[in-house]
Image (spheres, helix red, strand yellow):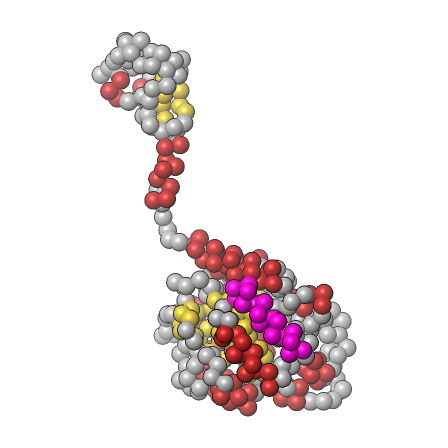
């Protein structure tokens, strides 16, 4: 495919996102509030205290997601799933965030200095969120093939964040092309492994620069692995956005608690991802200005005992030691057998002026 676009900065709300900015950290509340508004508000406050830049909700009802039936395919049969045996309908009933909470949670997040937005899962949810003036939309990985949903969200004139999950290159191309055709060029793709939890060995972070090159978009990571290692590593590969599920206490329950960060981990992610971004720097050799003072602690040639005028120089009276105020070690061979021009006291840095010519 022809790449006609460049990954320039994108402004979401009052925040600039791009390679020249620290990674944008999103705390995904998902259904970890366990249908308690007070818990949800406590999560928003905790995310702000941790330094997250945004909170994200998911906007759906059980009826907008699936059918209330127990037929094959509507019940989770995978024995290794966190939700084995649950019907899709019952799971989404438990995990959904009531529509009537959205405005209050968004307002609370904004008052605490964070952006707030959500993932719509149907076209009605797009209109609902747009009415609440969200600064952007997020398309979940399982909805990346819902082309009418992407077209609807992209038509609202706001940035679009899309998780790629298990999508093929052609499926991503269709999603991105649809968004652009609907007038949205502010697109951020998130590399995502759609297993819950995800294994580090199945995360394939090296896809990030390939995605960026293929689609000319900023690329980030929607991470379902445990801990923060994969997320911090993604920064070195150019991730500008990191999304992690958040919970107050993994042992306290929540549909996504098993692969969600607790507050101390979210704080660490905010800090360490910024450090990783700062550490990228530029290609540089010869030391930075900050290292100049350290150069004195390199080695150089010194008199290791008193040397009389005319005395030959050699291993018996010279030594390569720290600091670096004498002749550089590369001149060691050149000074062997030369004679002292004058008396050289022990501890004197050797210089050409002290050597008879």
Q: How many marks?
A: 0
- Magenta stretch: includes residue 41: yes
Name the spot of residue 282 as percent of width and height, x first: 37, 53
Name the spot of residue 8 as percent of width and height, x first: 37, 70
Tell me if 13 is positioned left or right of 106 in this view: left
Give the quarter of the image for residue 203. bottom right
Query: Looking at the image, which is closer to me, 136 or 88?
Result: 136
Tell me if 281 is positioned left or right of 134 in this view: left
Whether residue 313 is visible here, answered yes or no, is: no
Quadrant placement of the N terminus:
bottom left
Q: Going 33% across and 25% down the picture, which residue do you hit?
A: 326
- Magenta stretch: includes residue 302: no
Quadrant placement of the C terminus:
top left
Q: Going 28% across and 9% down the picture, which residue do you hit?
A: 309
Q: Going 66% across and 86% down the picture, which residue do you hit?
A: 62
**Where are the magenta residues, as a range?**
36-52
The rendered magenta stretch, by its main secondary structure, is classed as helix
Query: Looking at the image, which is closer to me, 305 or 205?
Result: 305
Q: Is residue 35 above or below residue 279?
A: below
Tell me if 339 is positioned left or right of 268 in this view: left
Whether residue 278 is visible here, answered yes or no, is: yes
Q: Is residue 307 above or below residue 302?
A: above
Name the spot of residue 254 as percent of width and height, x first: 69, 72
Give the quarter of the image for residue 32. bottom right
């Amino acid at each position: 495919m022809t790449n006609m676009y460049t990954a320039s900065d994108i402004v979401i709300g009052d925040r600039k996102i791009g390679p020249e900015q620290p990674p944008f950290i999103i705390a995904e509340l998902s259904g970890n509030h366990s249908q308690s508004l007070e818990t949800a508000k406590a999560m928003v406050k905790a995310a702000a205290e941790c330094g997250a830049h945004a909170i994200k909700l998911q906007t759906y009802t059980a009826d907008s997601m699936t059918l209330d039936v127990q037929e094959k395919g509507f019940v989770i049969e995978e024995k290794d799933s966190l939700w084995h045996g649950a019907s899709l309908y019952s799971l989404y009933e438990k995990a959904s965030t009531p529509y009537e909470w959205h405005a209050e949670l968004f307002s609370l997040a904004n008052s605490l200095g964070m952006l707030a937005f959500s993932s719509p899962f149907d076209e009605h949810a797009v209109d609902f969120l747009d009415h609440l003036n969200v600064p952007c939309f997020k398309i979940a990985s399982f909805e990346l093939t819902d082309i009418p949903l992407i077209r609807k969200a992209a038509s609202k004139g706001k940035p679009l964040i899309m998780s790629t999950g298990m999508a093929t290159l052609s499926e991503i191309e269709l999603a991105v092309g649809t968004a652009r055709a609907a007038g949205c060029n502010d697109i951020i793709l998130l590399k995502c492994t759609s297993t819950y939890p995800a294994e580090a060995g199945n995360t394939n972070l090296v896809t990030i620069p390939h995605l960026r090159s293929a689609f000319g978009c900023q690329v980030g990571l929607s991470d379902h692995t445990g801990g923060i290692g994969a997320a911090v590593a993604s920064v070195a590969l150019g991730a500008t956005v990191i999304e992690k599920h958040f919970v107050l206490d993994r042992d306290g329950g929540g549909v996504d608690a098993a692969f969600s960060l607790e507050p101390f981990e979210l704080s660490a992610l905010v800090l360490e991802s910024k450090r990783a971004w700062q550490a990228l720097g530029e290609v540089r050799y010869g030391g930075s200005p900050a290292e100049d003072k350290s150069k004195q602690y390199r080695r150089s040639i010194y008199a290791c005992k008193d040397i009389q005028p005319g005395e030959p120089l050699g291993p018996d009276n010279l030594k390569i030691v720290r600091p670096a105020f004498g002749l550089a070690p590369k001149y060691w061979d050149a000074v062997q057998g030369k004679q002292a021009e004058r008396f050289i006291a022990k501890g004197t840095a050797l210089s050409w002026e002290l050597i008879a010519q």
